[in-house]
Amino acid sequence: MELGFEVVDLPETDYPTEGEQAPDFTRPLVTDEQWEDVSLSELAADQPVLLVFHPMDGAFPSTYMWNELRDRAFEDDHDVQVVGVSISSPYEHMTLIDDREMEFALFSDPQNGVAEAYDIVNDLDGMAGVSEPRPAVFLVDSELTVQYAWAAEEWPDFPDYDAVSDAVASL
């Protein structure tokens, strides 16, 4: 079967794993109506956060990931906030939220500094100086302790959504 793209192995990474501390950060958090600077620790103080790193808005992996997460309704079934992070601007995030009919909030990180802090940077081939986060998922509690972690090892790659669901259900 012709995929229309090449599967690429990504370099090894040392991302935070279960039991480790997730890096805190503050970035614009975008909803369907507004955005404002919010820190991960502020969100996690209210309830656990499923932090989903995704490629730029409009890329097929982002569409696939958010459709799957939306359809699984994690927030409806569990006491968890699903929140995204990508290099896309707040304006692009508002369009994605509207187009995908999502109720999730998305952090805007155009310089990709959050992905750097989590060691999940994906340098884009053929684009000097342009990077985005590799797909990754971190479930963090109120103390920012990682309860579940997954990061792509190849491009494209997607989380095991059943494993993510099990991790969320185990909180």
Image (cartoon, rainbow, N blue to C red):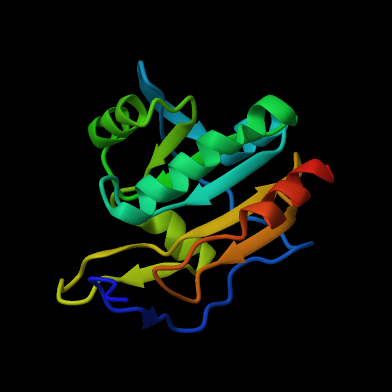
Direction from residue 80 to residue 115 in the image, left or right: left
Q: Quadrant of the C terminus?
A: top right
Residue drawn at x 27%, y 75% is 2
Whole-percent x, y for residue 21 in the image:
70, 58
- Looking at this view, is 38 or 79 the one in front? 79
Direction from residue 83 to residue 149 in the image, left or right: right
In the image, residue 41 above or below residue 123 = above
Quick one: which residue is furthest to the front in this view? 1
In the image, residue 7 above or below residue 129 = below
Quarter occupied by residue 151: bottom right
Residue 39 in view of the camera = no
In the image, residue 164 above or below residue 153 = above
Quick one: which residue is furthest to the right in this view? 170
Whole-percent x, y for residue 161 in the image:
62, 53
Residue drawn at x 29%, y 72% is 3
Quarter occupied by residue 48: top right
In the image, residue 147 above or below residue 28 = below
Residue drawn at x 29%, y 49% is 110
Quarter occupied by residue 111: bottom left
- Looking at this view, is 2 or 139 the one in front? 2
Whole-percent x, y for residue 145 in the image:
75, 52
